[in-house]
Image: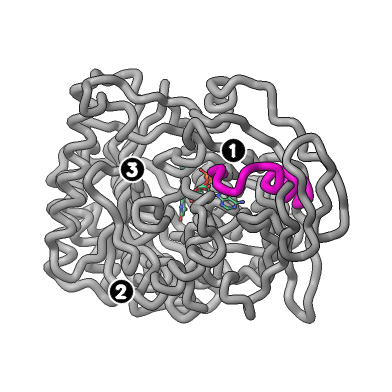
Amino acid sequence: MKAAGAGGIGIVVGDVLTTNAFGQTGLPPKPITMSNDEWFAQRAWSVSANRVVPDADGKPQPVTSLAKRIHRPKSAAEIAAIVKSLPPSTPVACVCGGHEASGTALIANDNAEILDLIELKKIEFGHSGDDQLVTVGSGVVFRELVEAVKTHGGALPVGTGPGVGVAGYVTNGGLSSYFSRRLGLLGQRVVEMTIVTADGDIRTLTPEDTLFTAMLGAGSALAIVVDMTIRVAAADAIKHAEQLVFGFENRAQAIEFSRTVMQFMKEKVIPNESVSLELVVTGTKALVATIVFYDTFTGSTADFIRPLQDAAAGQDLPTLATAEWNSWYEAAAALWPVIAEQKGSPLATSYHCVGTTGIPEAKVLDFVADVVVGEAPLNEAGMSIVEIRTLGGATQKGRRLPSGNCHHAFFVDLVTLYDAGSKSPAERQEIVDLTNRVVDKSRAMPGLSVDFSGTHSQPDDIGRSAVASEIFGSQAMATAVEEQKKKMDPNNRFRFHPFSKFLS
Ligand SMILES: Cc1cc2nc3c(=O)[nH]c(=O)nc-3n(C[C@H](O)[C@H](O)[C@H](O)COP(=O)(O)OP(=O)(O)OC[C@H]3O[C@@H](n4cnc5c(N)ncnc54)[C@H](O)[C@@H]3O)c2cc1C
């Protein structure tokens, strides 16, 4: 028999009732009966680009879940009962949306128990004073949250992927390219959280708890989130958005256009917090500029975007499409159809980011144009993109979280993405090598941060890893997270997360 834990929890391993912190009793639910392969195919959006290359022995690596058992708990009490029923050293992996690029939680290991949180679909609205709040279960994905927030006239700094898990995004410090400059990181809007600890205790955390802050950027290493309560912004915080899509034929054109747009970003957008700009350079030879105007913007939106149109005209780039959005919802949902087209057998991916905390110097912009845009494997991995973004604004002014994202004003994301079924092992290796070459060159570039985000770094890169002080934003935050890790999870049960190389 295992001893009772804090909060009055009693537990006997085996077929015996457990009593949780809220006084409920119950057996741990039975694991799912679906095979690991079937479950993985259903829940994994992609597999890591590092997994579809032969390993050092020349053998392919498994692209399925290795877990011993997979559970689908329906409540905090069921999560607690499962955790309590296991030996304290058994590793536990949590899966929310299944979109993390290395797939570490989906794959886990052969001793691990996976908690697939897909059944935790609560979305409940409430109020605290003048603030509208929404409580979101840890199985909720962005499409569900965005649709619900729309009906309540709200806005949130959500991620672009409709299937990305809200909990997986927040616990790894996720950012919104379109909305974070005005609304901060989603984690900066969280006011309360229910968790289950590595001991199986159910706890409610508020901003006064040290663990609360640590959860909003390093949470996937510390505890299991059951739900989060988030402060909703008014929908009219987002006034208008324009998207301009230009075509290019060769990389030199993409480099030149990116350089001009980044100069515009530096001079006109980064110093002006009432607007954000994202330029996406795609493997399908498009340059997609999205300009989001916030409620604080004054002046003519047409005048504001004209230099971008002039730059494209000056290079004779054809306009492929234009779009205007007049609500937060339209902008939040705009990329869903594009992302729905990203398919592969399997879809292989890796994520990396670079950026600066202040206004980028000219040599940094040249580097991003010449190397990140110029050398990214856009031809070899055809669905790949380079996203060049403004951040900062409310994100830099808001509460400090353990995420490099809340320190950066300028953010470039290299998403390597392709259909592995259409590539030979040698071609897959070439894609990994080309991506690594860009990352290595970026690390050598003074003034540029590299892999400072839990949602835009690739934890399974071989021989490469983000640094704790960079990914958590500062050495002090890294130390605070390490202390929480030792205190909350001394057996390192929660080891399947983007920080696993340096946090155990
Ligand atoms: C199409 C697409 C669009 C994206 N857009 C953005 C974007 O706009 N901004 C951005 O920042 N990122 C973005 N990302 C990256 C994404 O936010 C991260 O990969 C995120 O971690 C995925 O969360 P998930 O729940 O879907 O993944 P999962 O693989 O389920 O989880 C990711 C990590 O979080 C942990 N975790 C999940 N749920 C819990 C829980 N309840 N408690 C504790 N730990 C938990 C898991 O164990 C795992 O370590 C995008 C990714 C894709 C594929």
Mark 2 falls on what kind of element?
loop
Asked if the beta carbon under badge 2 is closer than 8 A to the nearest atom of ligand 1, the reply is no
Residue type beneath disc 1: Ile
For the residue pair 185 and 275, the one nearer the viewer reads as 185
Q: How far apart are marks 3 and 1 (CA)?
A: 19 Å
Callouts 3 and 1 close, C-beta under 8 Å: no
Question: Please, is residue 197 above or below residue 100 in the view?
Answer: below
Q: Residues within 10 Å of mark 3 (few under 14, many from 20)?
A: many
- Image height check: is 484 above or below 150? below
> Which residue, given by chain and number where applicable, does mark 3 sit on?
460
> In the structure shown, which secondary structural element does the residue marked by tag 3 occupy?
loop
| Mark 2 Cα-neighbour bin, 10 Å: few <14, some 14–19, many ≥20 | some
Of the image marks 3 and 1, the number of the one nearer the N terminus: 1
| Residue 377 percent coordinates (x, y) | 21, 38
Residue 73 seen: yes
Vertical relation: 345 (above or below) 196: above
Which is nearer the N-term, disc 2 or disc 1?
1
The one of 37 and 410 positioned closer to us in this rendering? 37
Nearest-to-viewer mark from 3 and 2: 3
On the image, the x and y values in percent for residue 304 come to 37, 69
Task: Pick the residue in front: 173 or 35.
Answer: 35
Asked whether residue 474 is drawn in magenta, I would say: no
Question: Residue placed at 59% from the left, 53% from the top?
Answer: 167
Give SS at disc 1: strand
The residue positioned 38% from the left and 59% from the top of the image is 453
The residues colored magenta run 75-92
Q: In this view, does 418 lie to the left or right of 483?
A: left
Q: How far apart are marks 2 and 1 (CA)?
A: 37 Å
**Quarter holding the C terminus?**
bottom left
Label 1 sits on residue: 114
Residue occupying the point 13% across, 63% down: 445
Q: Mark 2 points at which residue?
A: 357
